[in-house]
Amino acid sequence: MDEKQLKVVGDSGAGHNSNLLKATLEWKVKIGGSVRYPQILDLAKLWSLPTCEVPIAIECVSAGKIYGKKPAIFMGVSLQEIIALVNPESQVQTVIFTSYAPGSCGPETEKHCTALDYEYCRTAQDVIVSGCLNGKPLPYKNGGPLRLVAGAERYFYKSLKWLREIEFSIKSLDECLGTWEKYAGYHNVARIEHKERFSPFLCEILDVDENGNVSSLQKIATEEQSAFIEDAHQRKNFSHIVAAKVKWEQKDFNSGVFCEKNRCAQLRGINFARASFLNADMRKANFSLSIFREAKFSEGGKEVANLDYCDCEGASFLKAHLENVSMKKAYLLNTRFYPEGENKKYSAYVRGLDLTGSIGIDRKQLDWLREDGAIVDDIVTLKTIEDEQGYLPVVQVEVVHDGNDAIYDQLQASKLFHNTWRSTCKINAWGYIHKKNEINKLLCKLSVVYNDVLFTVSPNPVWLLSTMRSQDG
């Protein structure tokens, strides 16, 4: 994998209302709640605040390392700066972050949100509002022009994309469940050190919208959970269940139905080791991070289950029986059919497994699947919008000189500028705003050497994307 590419996990932005989410020059962030000085900041005002760079070894809750071995370098404004700006009330306990985009679970009418403990935001050095990745504008598909980066101690699902609002709340963190936490059972704190991926979660789907998104859930009380699960097994119907990190004693899912009348089971982080799914209709269900070690999806290539369109992100199928099973157009980012490394001792049985059109399979897994007789034609990549530029303000430098090429060479060699171009007696360059101090130091040095040359730095940020477009047009 290219170390400079951040994988897209979850919402890629492909289905967004482009008029809303790409109106970047009008982008505003509301900062309020229980604060003394509420703010509404456009991006120019936001980037006028002091910025910092933080290295983050990204850990996705279900897809593992989605960037590579080296940490990603995010630039932005720290939550500490924002806290100093708005001066929260002493009773504040939680910071709630809301996106311009709807959640990719739960009803489409609700904007995606998540929350962090206020004390963590106040003290952590690497919780920032970011618009830059590795010295370049943050791509739209990765949350640009503005996202939250929740620090290296939290799973990356807490790092909300397309940030719209920051609210300082006097409610406790337990009272402020985000979208993934409320509708999918993801852990509300998400500390990597404690492996806080899910909280025990068992709910019945009461209603879905016209697109099949869950709009209403009923939590099943602890003392009623065993009977609720037993009833589902007797009826061979699991389509009404949303569960995470629930102990599942029953192992017989033969002929079970997991999706019916627009309701689809969501069974994340469940241990289904050695369970049997012969003849099961599992289409469109979500099994993220679930374990299917030694599970039976076919019996010698017969009585096969159907897993078309399933979301199996991060799931494990080690030693599972998948001969002739259909898994077309499934989402398989970080899905494991083989163990890590070079040892295939615990590999799944995959001859005839049909993965046509599936998305996100790891390259090594794909090679082994092909080698062992799986059908892996027409594997597709994640769909993202085409715009890769991102949006970030730059300072514009103008140099008026007498034709001395050495100045241009030194500006180029500094590597502080995104773009540099020249005419006979003038040089124009763009430098990212978070490098402004370094740019000023360089220009001061050059002005001493070339004291008859005029160096000018624009007082206001120039927007990279709009400037590029006007130049092209």
Image: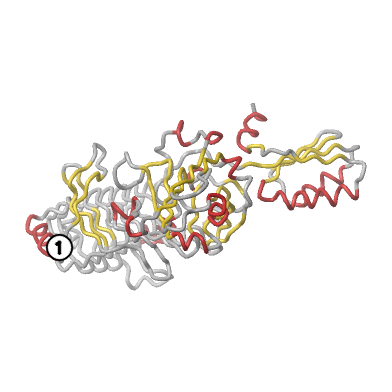
Q: Is residue 316 visible?
A: yes
Q: How is the image coloured?
A: secondary structure
Q: Quadrant of residue 426?
A: top right
Q: Secondary structure at mark 1?
A: helix
Label 1: few (<14), some (14–19) or many (≥20) C-alpha neighbours in 10 Å: some
Position above or below: 19 against 248: above
Q: Position of residue 138 (x, y in %)?
A: 55, 47
Looking at the image, residue 7 sits to the left or right of residue 257; the answer is right
Residue sitting nearer the eye, 350 or 268: 268
Residue at the image position 32 percent from the left and 39 percent from the top: 109
Residue sitting nearer the eye, 271 or 230: 230
Residue denoted by label 1: 225
Q: Is residue 373 visible?
A: no
Residue at the image position 28 percent from the left and 65 percent from the top: 291
Looking at the image, residue 96 sits to the left or right of residue 218; the answer is right
Q: Quadrant of residue 279?
A: bottom left
Looking at the image, residue 39 sits to the left or right of residue 293; the answer is right
- Numbered-mark total: 1
Q: Specify the quadrant that holds the C terminus.
A: top right
Q: Amino acid at mark 1?
A: Gln
Looking at this view, name the residue that lies furthest to the left. Answer: 234
Looking at this view, name the residue that lies furthest to the top. Answer: 473
Q: Position of residue 237 (x, y in %)?
A: 12, 53
Position above or below: 87 against 452: below
Q: Position of residue 372 (x, y in %)?
A: 33, 62
Residue at the image position 58 percent from the left and 52 percent from the top: 77
Residue sitting nearer the eye, 412 or 120: 120
Looking at the image, residue 434 sits to the left or right of residue 314; the answer is right
Q: Position of residue 243 (x, y in %)?
A: 23, 58
Position above or below: 393 against 88: above
